[in-house]
Every structure is written in structure tokens, then in C-alpha cells.
Amino acid sequence: MDSALIPKGVERCSLKRFLLGQAIVGAVVLWGVYAMILCWMKGLNQTNMNDSFGFALWIWADLAVIAVGGGAFFTGLLRYVIGLKDLKNIINYAVLIGVCCYGSALLILAIDIGQPLRGWFIFWHANVHSMLTEVAFCLSLYMAVLIIEYIPLLLENRQVDKIPFFHNLSHNMHVVMAVFAATGAFLSCFHQGSLGGVSGVLFGRPFAFREGIFIWPWTFFLFTWSAAACGPCFTILVTKITEKITNKKLVKDNVIDLLAKISGWMICSYIIAKTIDTLYWAFVTAPHAGFNVMDFYDDNFWAHGIWILIMEIVICGYIPAIILLREKTRQNQKLLWTAAILATIGICLNRWVLVMQPMSMPVMTFDEWVLYLPSWQEIATTILPIAGGIMVIAFSYRYLPIFPQEQELNPVED
Amino acid sequence: MKIYRRSFLALGVGAAVGTALSPLPWKMVDDSSIWSQNWPWTPVPKDGAISYEDSVCTLCSGNCGIKARKIEDRVIKVEGKEDHIVNDGGVCLLGLSGPQLLYSPTRVKSPLKKIKGKLRKISWEDAITELSEKLSGIRDEKSDKVAVISGNSKSLSTLLLKRFLKAYGSPNYFTRATMNDTYKQVIKKMHGVDATPAFNIDKADYILSFGSGIIDGWGSPVNSIKANSKGVDNSRKLVQIESRMSNTAIVADKWVPIKPGTDITLAYGIAAEVIKMKEPKGSASLKPFLNKYGLSKVAEVTGIDAAQITEMAKDFATNKSIAICGKGAGNTAGSFDEFVAVHTLNILANNINKKGGVQVIKDSGFFNWSNMKMDSVAKAANKKQAITGNKFPDTESFLNKLPNESVEVLLIANDNPLYTMADSDAVKKAFEKIPYKVSFSSFMDETTEIADLVLPVNVNLEQTDVVSITESVQKPGIGYVAPVSDLQFNTKDLGEILIETAKTIDGMADAFPWDDYESCISAILGDKLESLQEEGVIVNEDYRAKNLSFKFIAPKNEVLAPKGDKGVYPLVLVPYDSIRIPNGYIGAPPFAVKTVSDKVIKGKDGFVEINPVTAKQLGLSDKSSVKVKTSEGSCKVKVNLSEQIMPGVVAMAKGLGHTAYDKYLAGKGVNVNNLLGTVEDPVTGSNCAWAIRCKIEKV
Amino acid sequence: MSTIDEKYQKVVVSPVDEIIGSEKGSSAIILVFFIAGLVASLVVGWVIFPKVLYSQKKQPFDFSHEVHSEQVEECTGCHFFRDDGTFAGVPKLAQCAECHEEVQGDTPNEKVFVEEYVAKEKEVPWLIYSKQPDCVFFSHAAHVKKAEMECKECHGDIGTSKSLKVYEENRLTGISRDVWGKSIGGFKSNTWDSMKMDVCAKCHEKHARQKEKETKHEQKNNYKGACFQCHK
Amino acid sequence: MFPFSFEWIWDVGHVVFHGGMWYALSIIGAGMTYCVLKAAIDTKNGKGGGDHH
Amino acid sequence: MKKEHDKVNKKYGMVVDLDKCTGCGSCMVACMSENNVPFKEDESNKLDSITWMRVYKVSNKKPYPNNEVFYIPRPCQHCGGQHEGHSPCVSVCPATATDYDYTTGIVSQVYTRCFGCRYCMAACPYHARYFNWWDPVWPDGMEKYLSPNVSPRMRGIVEKCSFCFHRYQVAMEEVYGSDDKEALEEGDYQTACTQACPAGAITFGDLNDETHAVHKLKDDKNAFRLLERLGTNTKIYYISEREWVRRAGDNYNPGEKTGSVKYKTEGH
């Protein structure tokens, strides 16, 4: 029925099956939308946040999706600015994943603030010293860049492409894409960093606070580095999952391998920097504020135990780095999967720790640890953009030429 | 077709560009945020001229000077009045909540009469007629079957109520005995004068407090807190003797946990040691009797280290010392024997009527009551005894006697006995027997809910009254309660109601010769009224009672055992006063409830404070649900493990567990009064129970 | 590659032909539609929108500032300062009644005032043109007494007006139109055309910079951290 | 956000931060304007055929 | 120029004598009443209960009978930060809704500017900031006691202690309006909690002004501030003769002496 819209030379499942799948995801989206409307109409009392946990699940989700969405800017940087031609075979998908991630982040932010109608004050009355201002500016600008990067793809839909203006537009945008990509990389570097700065500058919260250069705490640089390092892993992971679901090979191994190798080097250098940062923090920054680093990990072991640090650095840092660095291991599919998953978990865990632990931890001597469990509204609204992302990806995959190598890898016989 | 589609697109693009170039979207964005800044459902307080009006707070017997900040005719805030003899600018949280009480939706908005089981609005005229007919109807036959329960207020309007009952012809006027009432009897017996005590704790160097919550509402609450601060400035030493660490123990220099009920032994034990160090004049007669209190025995009975007792005695003997008693806020009467024991220490310290000691205050005589003209009914009735006999007319004793007495009409003012009295189930039952109950409450409280006639009185900010200030203040006097707010509802002053009613009852009018309440006040105050209204307070400079005699009294009891069988009820339950939870006849306003710790109320749950050692023995953990049982009742609460209480003793806050009032108060925690019983003091006749035995079971 | 090329070949041939076919005529029509959309939306935004946005309310009765300023010389004669420095704003009934106990003159408005309000002791529910939202604290004392500003500078020529203009209220925000200003675009030519925050801020900033030059004192607070001076 | 806003201060923070923002915004704006205009011109010139890539 | 700047500007602060504080709660209620702080049915969850002034009960955690306790009132600490104005919250607020008032040293909060991102709450180690999770609702009739000097806040924004700044505004009106009054005197501007405290434990005034009581009290040998070593440079000083109480004011590494870690900040 929709065959006129499907790119030529590729095979897609039946519309019925596609819509059925979409309906299932759509139900989740509706659930999320319901929760979102509740939050907007009734206010944030719908959440389990409180005055101690002002930043909670949402802010973590924000930081996490942006971190894993880092694959878009970094791949873009490698492809357009550094000029790794091979990556053109995955850049479309990286951009698409980026669009989903950043779209999610913006949507979550719009729910997260107590007065969504005044959200624009962050631009209009900007306090340039606030990391959050920087985040908002770069985030929305970069979102614009991502959309610009995504538009040519949309225009390449078979029916749209028939219109000469759109065809030309798409062509011209391709021509100047490097400029956009460079701007995007610049913006992304900054806002990934400023997201790290968000907790790093909190000098009242010794768990989060980091020394740094001028106004930028170490977390500023670590966040950018880690997003660049682990983002591609997420791109690989999503690509692999897509291949599993579509039961097709979509990207050639050499492309994945190149990305994995770069990611491996990045993770390796990042995790060393992270280790140094952690040691400096544990032995200099924390004692300076009167804390023993073990004071930071306490109360409820499963929520705030030291395991979380070991998990983040050793299991989800060094292990994927080692796997990806060695050609032999990264070309082993199972290990590649493992590395991609671990790296993704690792970066999410890093964001989790930097958002949740500082809120949980008592700073005044007579404070107490606070435990927080998100409400269903928070969970639903956090799942909402993920489900939405799946739908966007599914539609895009079905109707747009996302994977340039798909036809070659899956010749259609008819 | 194709043209149409593309033209439509062009139209849309044009409209989009045009809209973007017009103010519409931008103004809408701006205005919607301004809308969010001025949501119509967020109240906007009306502005106007600011003014301040002075008055005296009557929400407790502390009688602080207050000033109300007003915007036009709205009272927006209550503040303490600077340079006032009682509080000098400070003010407690109940006083501060005055505006919440004034504008509270739980107020009784007009007179109500029970018709077919439901309280219904009636006019004041009808209400007063109703009351007067009811009273007139039985006056000739059984005027003494009318009783009054009144709060322990020293206001002119309360005195009018007393006068009303006397003129009507009944001796049954009951009030809640407080520590002051017990102490007055101690003074009477030991010094031979009718006088009120006051304690100069601000100027003493060493204070032995037998459980007196100096900063927990004891005496005049704000005044006592101020006195404590002065003491801190002067580096006084405060020793707090009690089984649970109250706030007073927290600010004290030393908290001395004592086995419950052994205060008498400790006081005499210290006295025995003091006498060894210095022998004050006239104490010889005391000596043989004190021999009974050997140090080791006292230590054993009280559970306090002998060395510590010696140290206390030494400090007491060598400093400008004072000993004080009256547990917690002192709102309940104490044991006569215990008060005598403590006062004995004061005599040994030679501090009576001295700076830093116990002041024995005579009546100011500022109220100039004309001789009351009584008719034959009243005269006859005045020869009769009250239901409680010749002892102090304590409300608790009255309630205990109620099951065997017949009372036709009960008038209740300034009290909420169904909530405030021990064993409220029993009180409720006793009340059911009384055919006609009249409540003079401002609020729809527990007692008012079951009344047959409700005559709502003004709240403190609307009242006109005169109060005599005596509680723990260094200089006594009288204060003028001025109405700082217009009447919010259809209410009246108590005095106004009484005078109007008295005029309609045959034979009573002569006792109430004034035209109205206002002229009554000016008649009673005479030429002092003008300066009183101007200054807000008149101080009685010459207040010390003279010609005191000194006499020691041997105690009947050495230990006051809490009610209950030790075998069945192994623990001792101590109800405690918290200044944050008003526990008198006025329920805690929302502001006050908000300040209560989450270890006292959490959601709807109340807590019982238990030492971890005791909890371990009972197999209880923090926040677990338990049932507290006493001989009088039981309740479900949660455990609050606390190192601030003796093992074997458990504590619960007073003032919670209301069933009346609003959602901000009702249903939160439990009313500890339900678990308490009464113990009648053999000397004073007042209820002197301060604790009860209990057991705790897991739920 | 050839397959892809073929694909594009087809694209150009088949249905698109029709679209490109009557090119000249269609682009003119498209332009007309574009302009139509543009003009219509501009009219909506600049003309109709403000009419819809603001509701028109009438004052309880008319009032002539001109007549009164003949009797009372200073604005502060009626719009007075209280002893504590606060500004009383629009006079209360009691103040008006000092002169208007009885009907004076023969205007119908006077009659309404005396009969409906003075006699019944009912405050006049004036609609206040310059009423700021609740979050604004404005000190008349600071501006009028300390800085000796003219009333006119913010309130315009209201003092000489013969009658009260229609009160326009923003339907969404509930705030008087005089605060935003008459011009829907937010343009202004007089100091009193708008009473928005940036108008206040601009003036404060100007004075601060001037003072900074004069005194050589850093006036940091006047362009940073000044929010709290007017907000409550 | 804008230099004419009263909240704007000419200091390093504002200039660097907003400078970066306006720089990025103008690149995005200019780039997109270029693409759209070029595409319009190309279309007018009858392009849109197979001469892409 | 800096010195002059100091002279011109005030720096309001508070000194609280913890040995006098009785935990009576008057300051909390005085604050609620003065500042139109709303209340709701259940306020026992202290994590969503708005109390600008909050009194903590702090114990030394020792078992009976060696347990000791003190009460500590905690308003907003009005941090100055390492250089005047670099408060933890002010520097992070994206929309300049909270700001440092240089003329008074007060950290402001403009409710209508705030859009509820709660970053300031994350930044504040004192939990002095409160979010309006609900619309404020007063029971029927009770809105009559609301003060027009403080705007009731709407749902979805952050609020906190303002040192009763509106009282400063009102006091200044009198100065502006008066011909002979040049400046505020110590008693003209006091916070509601200071005024209400029955124990007289709170002293409020201009820390820069030698004639004000706080100026001297802050240099008391037993004075300390909360979390001083974080460099928050607060304007609330606490005094206690008890060593363990002072030690509870900050975090210490083993071997560090109480009060040994005063943070060097501008203007000290």
C-alpha cells in the first residue's frame, strides 16, 4: 500500500506488520503523553521528587540521552571535518539517533521545569555564568543543526525527492553539510561539557564539585570526552539492534570496525583521565571539604554503595576499552556487543552518579541520606521519548534511504 | 488539483511569515508567561495602609503583650510587644498563629442549637432566651444542679462567669488545677498566706528543676524562655531532673535522669546533704525527719549516682539557688508532697521573697468588685458544698464524681474537656448523662460538637477583657485585652453574654448591675481603666506578701507510683508537653502543626518514644507499629527510638489526636489523654497524675 | 549505480510532468496566494489581535482630573503619602466624601457618585490604569520624594484630563493595557507610553552609569542584582 | 540575550558566551538561507533532474 | 574603590546563639506568617514542606545517658561566595531569578522570573530552598491574613528566605519619604524571626556596620558558620560554648581541630 513511499531497491515488511509494531510502541507513547499532560496540568507534585531531590530521574535521563547521542556529533566530526569517508555509510543513522536523543532531551526538559510557559526565560533573561544556560543554548542550537542534518534525508524520500525544489534543497544542503557539521561539533563539544559543568560547579555539593580551569570544572572536559568516546558505541549498539530486528546486514563490517576502533581509543584515554580525576577528587578535593571519600558512598549499599564507582570505571570503562582496542576482540561479534553495551551502561552510570549521588548525600553534618524512587509519571515520561525515538527510527528506516549500503548488502531479487 | 495543493502551501507559508512578523505569537508567548505569574487562583492580598494595634494574648495564661499588624481592617500578623513586662517582644508560635485562628473556617460562626440531633443556626436573641429559660426553669428547685467547667484563666470575664454561677446559686464551679494551684496550697500551709508563687529563675545562679519545662511552656511560656536566656547570659547552672530529655534538659547544663516518681526522695535527699553543709536558721526541726534520707538509700530509690546527689547538694548550698517543680508546662496540678519537698529546698536556700528566689505574690487588688447582691436562692446555695467537697474544685475530680451525681445543666468555657481531660471515653459517658450542655467555644471542638447550645465567643484578637498577670513574672500586674480586629463572625464576648443572660433571669439582675460589658469593665477598673487602656498594662510594684510564717511538713508519700499494676504494665508512659503543639482547649493551628517533627507525627501516625534498650527487650525496631496499652485505654502508634529517654520509660506528645477541627489537625497522631487516668492528691484533691503504667505490644 | 540513475530518470518523467507543465501561470498564482496569506496574517496580528486581546471596561462613573486639579493644586493633595512614607494611591471614599458629602454641581456622574457610593458608604471600584502586577513593589516615595520625579513622567497627562478613558484589560494576564503600552508593537515615544520592567530598568541603568562616572563608585547593583529592589 | 536588553553587560562573559551563540546562529541561518535560495534559483533554472551527486 | 564599595554597601547578617535557642519554633511560624508561606494537609514529609526558616534538632548520637542535643535554626544562609556575589545558587540560576543584591548582601529570589528548573536547589548544601510542588491554597477565609508586602507564590517555582527583604523596602520608604531621616537605624529593619524569638537568640543587622551588634558578635571566639570550608561565605553566624556543637557546623577530617578550617574569602 505504501510501496510508493518506500525507497527503491530495498525490502520492507508488510504495512500491516509495521503498523502493528508501531501500535505497540504507540501505546507506550500514549501512556507517556498521558503522564506528561498530568505533569503539565497538575504540576510536578506528580513526581516523587522533593526539596532534597530537585534533580532526579529526568535530569539523569537528559544527561544520559545526550551522552549516548554524542555519537552523532562525533561521527559527524569524523566524517565531515576530519574526512573519514567510510563513515558516510553510518553517518545518516548516527544523525537520526542524535535527533531522537536530543529531541528526547528537549522534551524531558520541557516537562521537568516547574513553569514550562516561562521556559524561554532561560534565553531571554540568560545568566551567562550558569552552566544550564549554556546547556539550553547549545542544546537547542545543536538540535537545529541535527534537524538540518536530518532534513536532506527526509527530502530523499522517493516522493518528496520528485519535487525539484526539495531535490535541489537536499542537494545544496549536502554540499554545505561540512559547515553545519563543524558548527554542530563546536556546539556539541560545549554543551556536552556544560552538562558536565552542571554538577561540577556545585561547590556546595562536595560529591559533585571538581576543580578545573577558569570556570570549567574537570567534569566539563570529561563529559565531552566520554560522550565522544561512548556515543559511537551507542550508535554501533543501535545499529546492531536494528540489524537484529530487521534481520539484515545494514552496515559493512569495516565501517563498524573503524568506528569501534576510534571509540576504543577514546574510551581508553577517557577512562585514564577519569581515573586520574577520581583519584585527585578522592585524595585532594574531598578532604579539602572535610570528607573522606568513603563518606560519599554509604547508607543504602544498593543505592549508593562503592560498587557503583567500581562498576563505572573498571567494568564499564576499562573492559570495553580493552575489547575495542584489540583488533581480534573487537571483531568478535559477541565481544563487540559486550563492549558496546558496557560502554553505554558506563556512560549512563556516570551521569547517574553525578546527578543522583550529590542529591542523596548529606553535606551538613546533621543531614541524612535521602532515598528517592521515581513515580510512575516520571518513568512514563522518561520512557516516552525512547518509545518516540523507536517510532521515528522505524518510520525513517522504512521510508528513507538511511543505510546507503543496504541495497548492496541485501540485493532484492524480483 | 495540483495548483490547489501548492497554492494552499503558498498561502500557509505566507501566513506563517506574516504571523511571525506580527506581534501575535510573541505577545502570546509573553502574555502566557505573565498569565502564569498571575494565575487567577493564586490569591493577591489587598494593599492598604499599615497600622499596629496593641493587645494582650489570651491563648494561654501567659498573657504576653502583642501587637497586631493590620492592613486596613485585616489583621495580617501578630508580633510581640516590645518592653512588655511579660514577653518584651518575644512571642510563641501559638500567639503568632492568632490570625489563623481568627480567620479559621473551623470557627463557630453564630449561635447554634441542637435540634433533632443536629446543631443549627439561631439568633443571639433566641440563644440567650433559650439559656435563660433553661436556667430559670430549674433555679428554684435545683440551682446547684448547674455546673460550670472553665479553663484556668485569670481574666475578668472568667471572674464574671464565676460570679454568674454564684449569683445563680450553685457552688459547682470547676477549673483545671495547675501547678500554681498546688503551689498556692503549699504556700498557704507552709507560710500561712494566700498568695501566688513566682520564680525568679532569671536571677538565680543555680536552678534545680524537678521536671519543670522552663522552655517547654512552663509558667508564662515566653517569659520563662526569656528568663532562661538571661540565665545563660549570667552563666547560671541549670540541672534538669526528669526521665525524658525535654527541651529544657537540652538547654540545661546537666540532665539528670531519675526513676519516675522518686522526686520527693531526691528533694529530701538533697535537703539532707545541704543541711550537712550549712544549717539555715530554723531548720533544726527538719533535721530528725531528714535522717530518713540517707545518701545511699536516696541513690538507690532515685537511680541517681550518690556522688551526683552530693554534687547537686553542694552546688545548691553554695550558690544563689532555687528549686522549681511542676512537670512539663505545669498545666496539671502536682503532688502536694512533692511540691512541699521542693519548697523545703527553697526555704533551705533562704530564697523566699529574695532576688533570684521564690516570690510570694499577694493579690493586686486592682479589680474593684462591688459587693454582690444575692437573692435567697443564691444565698441558700452558697452554703452548700461543691460536688468535689471542700477540696480544690478540680475539673478532673468533678468528672470523676459525675457518674454518681446528677447535673442538669453544664456550662463550658475556655476548655474542651472531651479532649483535654484524662480518659476521654469516661468523660464522654459522663457527659451523655447530662441533659443540657452549653459550650462557649469559639471553635467547633470535640466538646462543642456534643453541646446542646453553642454560644460562640470572640477569639483573642476580637476580645475585650482584662487579665491579671501573675505567672512566673517578676512583677505582677494587669493587662488590657483590646479588640484588634472587627468581629469576623456572629460572636460575642463571654462577659457580654453573661451580663445579658443574667439580666433576664429573675433574682440575678442585682448581682449584675452594669448596663453592659463595657460599663462593667469601667466600673471594676475604676480610674485605672484609662491608663490601662493607654499603657496596655499596669504593674503592681508592691507585690510581695509579708509576714510569712515558716513551717515544715512531713510528706505522706516518699515515692509517687504511677497508676497501674507493675506486673501487667511494666513500662511507665510519660505524656510530655511540647511548646510546638498547643495542648490546651485550642487545637494546634496549621502553622503549629507544620513545625512538628516527623518523629512526632508522620502522615496520620503518632509516635511513642522508646529507648533502644527497652525496644530491644520488646523486640521493636524504629518506626514499627505498636499498641500502647494502659489500664485506661490503648492506642496504635509507631516506635521512635530515642536515646533521650530512660530505659523503662516511654513518652508521647500531648496535643495530638484531635477528632474535631480541620484536616490540618484532625486525625493526626493519638490523644494521649485517652490513655491516662487520674490520681487524686490526698491533700489538695486535684488530679496529680503525671504518668501511667503501660505495656507495649507489637502489632 | 545505474539502477539509481534509472530511478531518477523515471522520477522526472512520470507524474511530475504535470506539475512543471504549466509553470508560468502557476508561479503567479502561487505568489498571489503567498501575498494573500502574508497580508491576512499581518492584519490579524497587528489589527484584529489587539482588539481581541484587550477587553474594554468602563469606570464606575466618569471623573474629571481637570476640575479637581483646579481645586486641589498638587497631585499629592488627593494621591497622598502616608506618614510611614507609603503611597496611598487612588483616594478612598472617606477622602472624597470630605467635599462630596452632598451633590455638588449638576453632572450626572456627581449624582451617581454621591447617591450610589457616598450615601451607601461603598468604596468606588475604580479600575486603575497604572496597576502593576502583584509581584511588583514600587516605591513612590523613592521616585517622587527622593528622586523628585514628576508624576507625569510615568503617568502622562492624566492630571489635566477631562474624563476617564476606557480601561483596557488584557484578557489573558488581567493586567491594564497601560502597563504594556498602547502600541501593540511595544513602541513608545513618551516616557509614559509604557510601564514595563525594561522601561524601569533602562532608566535605572542610565542613572547608575551616570552616578558611576560622577562618584567613581562602582554601581554594580544597579545593573546587576537589582531585581529585588522592585520585586516582592 | 540581545545587546539592547537592559540585562546585557559588556563584559567578557557576555561577549564570549553570546558571541559564540550569535556566531553559531548566524552560520546556521546563513547556511540555510544559502541552501534555500540556491535551491530556488536552481529550480527556476530548470534543475532537479539527474545531474546531482 | 573596593573599600569605598564596602562602606557604601550594607551586608546584612545574623548571629544565632545556639546556647539560647530552645527549639520552640516561633521563628518558623513568624517567618511563615510574615511571608505568606502556604501550608497543606500533610506537612510531616519534611522533604516537601516549605519552611524558609527550619529548626533542626541535632544530637551527638551518643547512647543514653550521654546523649546531648542542640537546636539550630537554619534560614537561607545568604552566601556571598568566594568573591562577593558568587553564591552557590546565584551563579547557577540560568534565568537570573535569584541574584545577589550588592547593596544589602541579600540573595534575592524573584518568583515571577523563576521557571522552576531547581538547579539552585541542587546547588544549595543547606536545603534552604523550597519548591512549590503544589498550588498554594488557603482554607476559606484564611487568605484574609495574607500580607500584601509579599507576593504569594505560584506552583512550580522555588522560594526561600529573603531576610524579610520587604521589611527593608518598607523601612526604606520611610527614609525616602522623610525629610530628616537619612538612613536606616539598626532597629528599623529586623527580620520576623529575629523579632519573634522569645529567647532573644537571634541578632540581625549590618555586619559591616560597627555600631550594629552583629558586627561584634560575629567575631566572638565561639562563632562559626555552617560548612565554612566549602567557601560559601555565609552571613549566618552561630555561637555556642560547646565544642561539639561548633564541630557539628562543618565536616572535619580526622585530626583536624574544630574551627581550624576557616575559608579565606573576600572582605574578611
Image: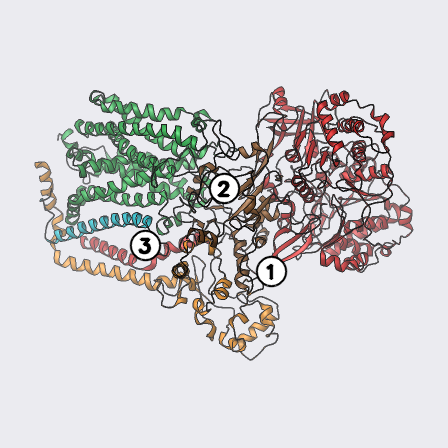
With B459 as the anchor, is E174 left or right in this view?
left
CA gap, disc 2 to disc 3? Answer: 33 Å
Residue on which the image places disc 1? B72
For disc 1, the chain is B
Question: Quick one: which chain is cyan?
Answer: D
Give residue A82's mark.
none
Give residue E128's mark.
2
Residue on which the image places disc 3? D2
Amino acid type of disc 1? Glu
Q: Residue B637's image quarter?
A: top right
Q: Is residue C153 above or below residue B353?
A: below
Question: Quick one: which chain is red?
Answer: B
Amino acid type of disc 3? Phe
Crowding near pointer 1: few (<14 within 10 Å), some, many (20+)?
Answer: few
Q: Is residue D20 above or below residue A61?
A: below
Residue A227: image location, x then y, percent: 29, 34
Nearest the eye: A51 or C154: C154
The N terminus of chain C, quarter of image: top left
Say if labels 3 and 1 share a chain: no
Residue C56: image location, x then y, percent: 44, 65
With B13 as the anchor, is B387 left or right in this view?
right
Question: Quick one: which chain is green?
Answer: A
